[in-house]
Amino acid sequence: MAPRFTSIDHVMSRLADVHYIAERSLATVLFLADRLEKPVFLEGEPGVGKTEVAIVLAKMFGTELIRLQCYEGLDVRTSLYEWNYPKQLLHIRMEEKGEKIREEIEQAIYSPKFLIKRPLLEAILRPAGNTTILLIDELDRSDEEFEAFLLEILSDFQVTIPEVGTLAAKTKPLVVITSNRTRDIHDALKRRCLYHWIEYPGFEKEYRIITTRLPGIEGRFAEQITGFMQKMRTADLLKKPGISETLDWARALLAMHKDHLDEEIVLETLGCILKYHEDIQKFKEEIWADHDQRSEFI
């Protein structure tokens, strides 16, 4: 398949077209992922836009996003394929009334039409020439056994199903793997990927994200929200708010027809920003209750 991007600038331009404000370093990783046909491994704090990278790539290429959400206990059956046993049983009962021999029935029930494709197999079997975006989200939530299984898939993009044979991708998908770093991912998997760490955005980038995603927001109001969130991330909290919380809060404020921050609206909408009761209590009692600290936020 021909390269999807002509240059790093081309990547940045295409990302901007789908309203994603990216650092040049991320655009470089995406450019190389396309040229070298390697997965992209994104790490960073929750809410900094890792998953969004895969979503905007799907938008960019006008294709469906194939998403595998990782969790403890994820296995081959739920990530790759499984046989449709009820359908197979029904087929066997129907065929037993006919004249087919056992071998013919077995051959029929282990054909692709009885196969339930899960996200990894779905990505492998996409038609040649089509851009496929595969998101393997929050890999750190899965078990190490699944991580080991993933090594084989990411190396060759093929899988062997005993009853069917080896199925290989005709066109390798663009793969985005994310991790919130709740546990270390094995080096063997990282070696197969292009690594990139997504930081919390600086003031300028966060302001651009707000005004790009919410074009109707007034510039001064966007500055006020950006400044508040930048200051909030300097506090000692269990969970610092990410860019997703910034956008959720800005949307909530606009929905409430607000055009500036004041003390009352901050307290009323604190749940849009902080997601732990301990953080909310700490903010109210140690930060917001202090006049000098409060004045630094708004």
Image (spheres, rainbow, N blue to C red):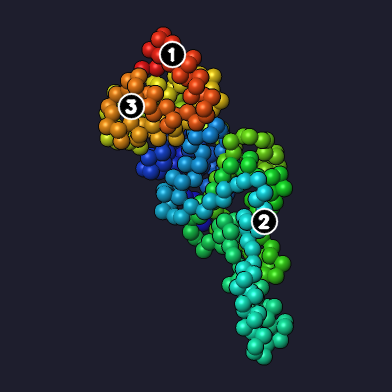
Residue, far bottom = 99
Mark 2, residue position: 76
- Amino acid on which the number 1 mark rests in the picture: Ala
Locate residue 257, reporting x and y percent: 27, 32
Mark 1, residue position: 289
- Amino acid on which the number 2 mark rests in the picture: Val
Residue at the location (41% across, 38% down)? Answer: 20
Question: Gap between marks 2 and 3, in whole Å?
Answer: 45 Å
Question: Gap between marks 3 and 1, in whole Å?
Answer: 24 Å
Q: Nearer the viewer, mark 2 or mark 1?
A: 1
Query: What is the number of the mark on residue 199?
Result: none
Residue at the location (37% across, 40% down)? Answer: 19
Choose between 169 and 276: the one closer to the eye. Answer: 276
Q: Are marks 3 and 1 in contact (CB under 8 Å)?
A: no
Check disc 3 and report its element: helix, strand or loop: helix
Query: What is the number of the mark on residue 222?
Result: 3
Residue at the location (43% across, 52% down)? Answer: 61
Choose between 65 and 124: the one closer to the eye. Answer: 65
Of the two numbered discs 3 and 1 on the same chain, state the one appearing first in sequence. 3
